[in-house]
Image (cartoon, coloured by chain):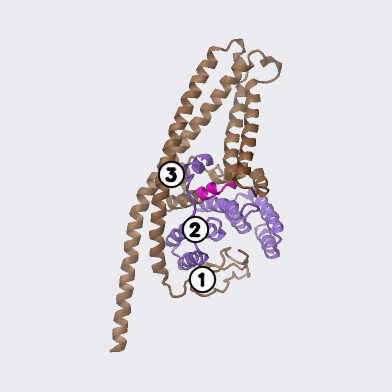
Chain colours: A brown, B purple
Amino acid sequence: MSDVTAVSPASAATPAQAGTAPQSPSGERTTLLPDPAAGALDGTDPLSMLYLFESKDRQLGVASATRQITALQNERHQAVQREQQAIAKAIDAQNHRSFWDDLGSVCSEVAKVAVVVASVAAAVATLGAATPIAALAVAGAVLSTASFVDGECHVLHSLGMDDATAGWIDTGLAVGGGLLACGAGMAAGAKAATSTLSAISRAGNVVAGLGGIGSGAAAIAAGKAQAQGDQAAADQVAAQAQSDHASRLMQVVVDDVQTADEQAQRVLGTIANTKTIQDQTAVSAATAVRG
Amino acid sequence: MDLAQFTAAVRGHRPLPSRPATIEAIYATAHWLLARERAADAAKVFRVMLRVAPRDERAWLGLGECHERIDQLRIAAELYGAGSVIAGGERSLSVRCLLARARVLAKLARGDDIERILDAAENAAAAQDDEALIALVASERRRLS
């Protein structure tokens, strides 16, 4: 889209006509939304279009939400399994520790952070593929719908964000900022993105491993056991976080499906009624004119 | 929120193919509704547009504006953030989404982030070699500084 002229929709002309750019007293533009193409709605009533799109949104919403819920349930099962495995590994590693036990609480933290960073970065690295783009579009739509229904704060808090948190898309993009530059060179798409994903994950794992092994030569003898323990702890943290997020998101999606369906029904009814009244008014007016 | 869960969760979903005329009609409808202060209705239509044309920056801008109209600035910021990447395509970022995001962050008094975003917008506009976009970024920088 190359049209730079931006106008405020609040005072634009009908969609079939190009609007004139409303300006503030200082002559500044007030919105970045461009005008619709001239004639985009020629011969079509916007209310009818709303009815159509409402129906379409409902169909899209239910279908995609069903897929989301199914996939999220699978994710949750996998997260629980990973958590159990991590706990088992931690217990096993604990049994093999000796006087080296006092090492590495700091190193352990480093390992956890590295794992989480690798996880977020890996997620962002997949932005180059087609599917995550659609996924983000769906995520945006769900976020928007849920916010309209439940309010901004409720939704953000449901997703585990406090006021100080930049946000889930935001955080992902910020952490993956460097990856976007990588993505710019990735005309090959998914394949290249996958290789970046692997590279980032590997880098994260290397850092995690280093953190787990501990600082310097002191850790050589018990390094392996300590590393296993720390890695297990990191795995557990990551699995727990994933499980929590999946649960929260699943709840949001379930709520979204329930409310969206009811809402859609109500809106369709309202639009249909409005259309009926409009039609009746038009018929009455035509009858009156004819005498 | 872990993005990985969500991207994995909806794996398999694909945007529906839509003719350009359909996209324009969707956008015109949403624009018409927003012009009449029907933000909730406009948001519904913008969401449809988001699903069928996620690469179109107008969908992200419009949906974000709907949330701004009801004072949900952080949601708007999220949408603009996602839009800046997705609508920018594989080789760049959406300059308008970045600018919209900078505006919202200014309202949220998150000044530290604004300069970074404006720099990204400037770089993206320069990379696209689009004089109008470059001018738009410069104008926004003056406005927000």
The chain containing the residue under callout 3 comes to A
Taking A247 as reference, is A132 above or below it?
below
Reading the image, the residue beneath label 3 is A68
Query: As displayed, is residue A56 above or below residue A173?
Result: below
Label 2, on which residue? B17
Q: For the residue marked with disc 1, what is the amino acid?
A: Ser
As measured in the structure, the alpha-carbon distance from the residue carrying label 2 to the one carrying label 1 is 31 Å
Q: Quadrant of residue A228?
A: top right
Question: Quick one: label 1 or label 3, which is nearer the N terminus?
Answer: 1
Reading the image, the residue beneath label 1 is A11
Give neighbour class at mark 3: few <14, some 14-19, many 20+ (Cα, 10 Å). Answer: many
User: Camera-side residue: A203 or A112?
Assistant: A203
Dot 1: element:
helix
Which image quadrant: the C terminus of chain A? bottom left
Could you tell me which chain the residue with mark 1 belongs to?
Answer: A
Q: Main secondary structure of the magenta part?
A: helix
Q: Is residue A256 visible?
A: yes
Q: Which of the 4 image quadrants contains residue A27?
A: bottom right
Please state which of the two labelled residues, at mark 2 or mark 3, is closer to the viewer: 2
Which quadrant: the N terminus of chain A?
A: bottom right
Q: What's the amino acid at mark 3?
A: Gln
- Judged from the image, the secondary structure of the residue bearing numbered disc 3 is helix
Identify the amino acid type marked 2: Pro
- Magenta stretch, residue numbers: A128-136
The local crowd at label 1, few if under 14, some if 14 to 19, many if 20 or more residues have their Cα within 10 Å, is: some
